[in-house]
Image: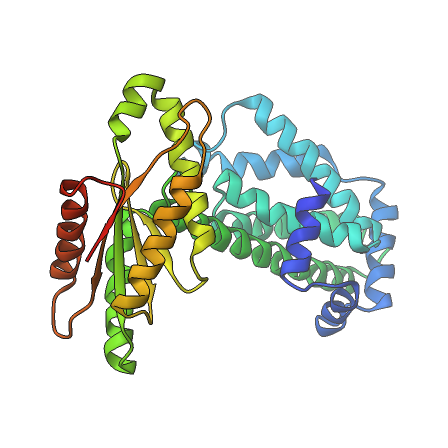
Amino acid sequence: MDKDIAEKIAKELNITDEDFQSRKLFLQITEEDIRNIKKLGAALGGIPEEMFRNFYNHLMSFEQTRLFFSGSNQIERLIEKQKKYFAELLSGEYDRNYLLTRLYVGYKHVELNVVPLWYIGAFNKYTDEIRKLVGRVKDRIDEEATVESIRKIITMDIVLTLESYHYAKYKLQEELKRMVVTDELTGIFNRRKLDELIEYEIDKGIRFEKPLSLIMLDIDHFKEVNDTFGHDTGDVVLREMADGIRRLLREEDYLIRYGGEEFLVILTNTPLEKAKNVAERIREAVSRMRFKKVGGITVSLGVAEYNKGEKKEKLLKRADKNLYMAKKQGRNRTCW
């Protein structure tokens, strides 16, 4: 178990030691249940190997789960882990380490693509096997009460593991969504995110009667940078450029990598005059930057403010047209 990961999940889910105790009370896990389970463990003296063999034979009878296993060695490793789990289950020691282990199992199930159906199905099968084991030593324990006590602990384990599973699944989905709309090189939004952002901000601007402006900028003579110094150096320039521009913007503004060496800035609640000033600050700041091997670089910028009723495509086209004017007029300048 990676304890750091398990502790992070517990923190994110707000499962404290106090909460863990409350869960036991909610599931009516009593001291009597713990005594029943410890008594079973002592009576059995260990879980027979056949229980785990029966379980994995059951799994191997289904095509979808059979494909999950890569060979007999993997099954042997899993059997050892299951033995460890049942030793912990029968110990009656349900402390923080027990909690963290259950949370880590949920996390690993996402990593290994073990679906909840398989997990719950596994516990169903194990419950049947446990009933058989309890029946073997029923002369030394209270059979019905012991089965009920184990059911309570297994229910707790299922809940913890599934909470962790859904948490990890959610985080994975959020990361995938972030990757889809994030430029891998610079870490800023890419064009996939543009349509969503600009439509949202246009609608918001109309609803609250707030201005919206765009800045489209292009690195001057960037092809020469790649041709002279190589694409690795060009990538460094793009990353440092994005970081530099981002520091000049407000938290509510957006920076998007629009093309190879083109960037787009969406300035919320910003009229044209203020947008021009922001663009000039960006242009001047970039002109003062120094890049390893390359030295100084300049940018050309086009600024446009949203006109009521126009489509986003027209707004983008106007910003692009103004950028083209800046290029045509000699670069390292802002046009609007």
Give me the residue at 70% from left, 45% from top.
4
Please provide percent x and percent y for residue 322: 16, 52
Quadrant in which the C terminus is drawn? bottom left
Horizontal side of residue 166 vs 226, given as left or right: right
The image quadrant that residue 30 belongs to is bottom right
Give me the residue at 68% from left, 39% from top.
82
Q: Is residue 288 above or below residue 249?
A: above
Give me the residue at 46% from left, 26% from top.
292
Please provide percent x and percent y for residue 95: 82, 55
Give me the residue at 27% from left, 47% from top.
217
Horizontal side of residue 164 vs 254, given as left or right: right
The foreground one among 326 and 194 is: 326
Indicate the colouring scheme: rainbow
Quadrant in which the N terminus is drawn? top right
Please provide percent x and percent y for residue 305: 21, 66
Q: Can you see residue 195?
A: yes
The image quadrant that residue 53 belongs to is top right
The foreground one among 191 and 88 is: 191
